[in-house]
Amino acid sequence: MSETITTDARIRRAMANSTKGEAARMTLPGWVRDLDLDAVDDVLGWRDPKAPERGVLLLAHEGGLVGIALRAGESAVRTAAMCALCRTTHAPGRVELLVARRPGAAGRNGDSVGTYVCGDLACARHIRVEKATAALRPTPGTDVEERRAGLRERAQEFVRAVLG
């Protein structure tokens, strides 16, 4: 008889730059529990509902699922800025520096990788915006599928940089 692993447990096991204890303490939003993790093809992200300075990026990587724990920097960008992952331009205060500690000894010694991303980590939703608004402006001249592919590619590059 094979063991059934819950969505929560799979996500916690996928956290590449967290200790088992950190992954166990992470709060998952309700919608995450409804995901079919075998079908994840977008870059998913969320802020920890109980610790808003922390967030998670979850994506398919090298044939499996990888989660990257993030921590918010001191403040959001005070001018309009572009997310480095989805390349959506946001109104002031909506893009933040988020930092991922490297796994293992490097991370314990303070080695980390940071990038400016959507503060709500909802890149997968933002790339689906069809028409620019005052708050969200997707990359001009691209369709949703091009933006999805670009998001996946840039998120993979970020994961590789974190995992070293």
Image: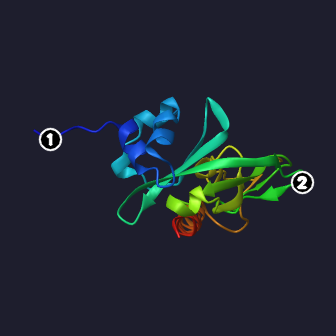
Q: Residue at x 60, y 56 (%)?
A: 101
Viewer-side residue, 126 vs 24: 24
Residue assigned mark 1: 2
Q: Is residue 150 above or below residue 53?
A: below
SS type, badge 1: loop
Q: Are marks 1 and 2 in contact (CB under 8 Å)?
A: no
Q: Is residue 17 left or right of residue 83?
A: left
**Residue 56 x/y as whole percent:** 56, 46
Circle 2 residues within 10 Å: few <14, some 14–19, many ≥20: few
Judging from the image, the colouring scheme is: rainbow
Q: Amino acid at mark 2?
A: Thr
Task: Please identify the quadrant where the N terminus is shown.
Answer: top left
Residue located at (70% from left, 61% from top): 115
| Three-letter amino acid code of the residue under disc 1 | Ser
Label at residue 49 = none
Count of labels in the image = 2
Give coordinates of residue 149: x percent, y percent: 54, 66
Mark 1 / mark 2, whichever is N-terminal: 1
Figure check: 90 above or below 23? below
Q: Residues within 10 Å of mark 1 (few under 14, many from 20)?
A: few
User: In this view of the protein, can residue 29 be seen by the observer?
Assistant: yes
Q: How far apart are the alpha carbons under marks 1 and 2? A: 52 Å
Q: Which tag is nearer the camera, tag 1 or tag 2?
A: 1
**Residue at x 47%, y 55% (from the top left corner):** 16
**Vertical order, 153 against 51 (above or below):** below
Q: Position of residue 89 (x, y in %)?
A: 77, 57
The residue at which mark 2 appears reads as 79
